[in-house]
Amino acid sequence: MRMARWLLRKFEGQGYVFFNELIEGEKEERKMKNYCLAVGMIILMLTVLITTASADEATPVTQGNMVTGSASASLFNRYVFRGYELSAHSAVIQPAMTVSYKGVSGSMWGNIDTEENPTQSFVPDREGQKSFNETDLTLSYNYGIDKLALTGGYVYYGTKYANETEEIFISAAYDTFLKPTLVIYRDINEYSGTYVNLSVSKSLPIYKGISIDLGASAGYFAGSAAYWKTYERSTGAYTGKKYQEFHDGMIKVGLTIPVAGNIIIQPLIQYWLPLSEKANKTIDGNSYNFNGKLDDTFVYGLNVTLSF
């Protein structure tokens, strides 16, 4: 009888391991499929753009019908996303590339942390080491009506330090004195929720093509997945209502300095801050927001852009 019970427990344990590995394998396969789909969309779009541009070379085109793009590289003292500190005590390098044609744009953005260190919002995938820990792909379409620019798109977040996820977004920008821009993002995968951001910006020419660039933004977040449940002292766990707050604010100042016909450098500094008490709140040493509390944070660095 003891031998039978031992064998039963052994097979139950092996069965659990088998099914757990099967589930994990399915998750990884689903992530890979999402990544391949996003990459495929970008490659297909770029192929269409290049093919169309080649076919149009024999006839004059206006600027609106030309393939345009940019490639850039940025160096910053830290990586902050929507107020969350996703690096600490290290420099980050952020390459990016965008190609556009007739309102359709495809872009790639990456983050290389030169030495990953944990923060209240970030768990490194390679602590203490260098890591290319994020690759984001965006596909969007822009439509202009006089001074109003409307954009809709899709973003794939390929993160090593968190579950990969996807968002769709819409935005409206009006070309007036402060160029107000409203963007609404909706996570459609791992972290279901809605993020709304309102920003303003102004560039002022100061000397021979050099301009000073000013900007500010404010964000509001409303979580809808169980992931966003908040911390409760009564239970000592994240069992409270879902996080919905005025979230992050940002103020920035920088310079745009042309160094060649199509190359600019942009030194800049940003100041990030929580916009509500709960965005910065902790309870017994635990962040009220499961994703981590926001702090007052300075980001500074340099961006170099080549346009084509």
Image (cartoon, rainbow, N blue to C red):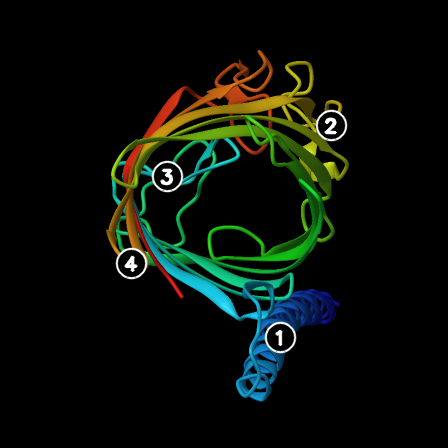
Label located before the other in sequence (4 or 2) = 2
- N-terminal-most mark, 4 or 3: 3
Q: Secondary structure at mark 1?
A: helix
Dots 3 and 2: beta carbons under 8 Å? no
Using the numbered discs, state the Cα–Cα distance from disc 1 to disc 3 in whole angstroms.
Answer: 37 Å
Q: Amino acid at mark 2?
A: Lys
- Distance of mark 3 from mark 2, alpha carbons? 24 Å
Disc 1 or 3, which lies upstream in sequence?
Answer: 1
* SS for callout 3: loop
Are there few (<14), some (14-19), or many (20+) residues within 10 Å of tag 3?
some
What's the CA distance linking mark 4 and mark 2? 50 Å
Kindly indicate whether the residue at mark 3 contacts the one at mark 4 (C-beta within 8 angstroms). Answer: no
Q: Nearer the viewer, residue 181 or 26?
A: 181
Q: Which residue is mark 1?
A: 45
The amino acid at mark 1 is Met
Which mark is drawn over residue 195? none
Which one is closest to the eye, mark 4 or mark 2?
A: 4
Dot 2 alpha-carbon crowd within 10 angstroms: few under 14, some 14 to 19, many 20 or more:
many
| Mark 1 in CB contact with mark 4 (< 8 angstroms) | no
- Tell me the tag on residue 261: 4
Rendered image: mark on residue 118: 3
Q: Considering only order in the chain, which callout, 2 or 3, is on the residue closer to the N terminus?
A: 3
Instruction: Report, in whole angstroms, how far the alpha carbon at label 2 lies from the one at label 1.
Output: 38 Å
Residue under numbered circle 2: 242
Instruction: Say whether residue 275 is left or right of residue 5.
Output: left
For label 4, the crowd category at 10 Å Cα-Cα, with few meaning under 14, some 14 to 19 and many 20 or more, is few
Q: Nearer the viewer, residue 261 or 286?
A: 261
| Residue 250 position within the rendered picture, expressed as x and y whole percent measured from the top left | 47, 25
Depth order, front residue of 74/212: 212
- When asked about the image quadrant of residue 17, the answer is bottom right
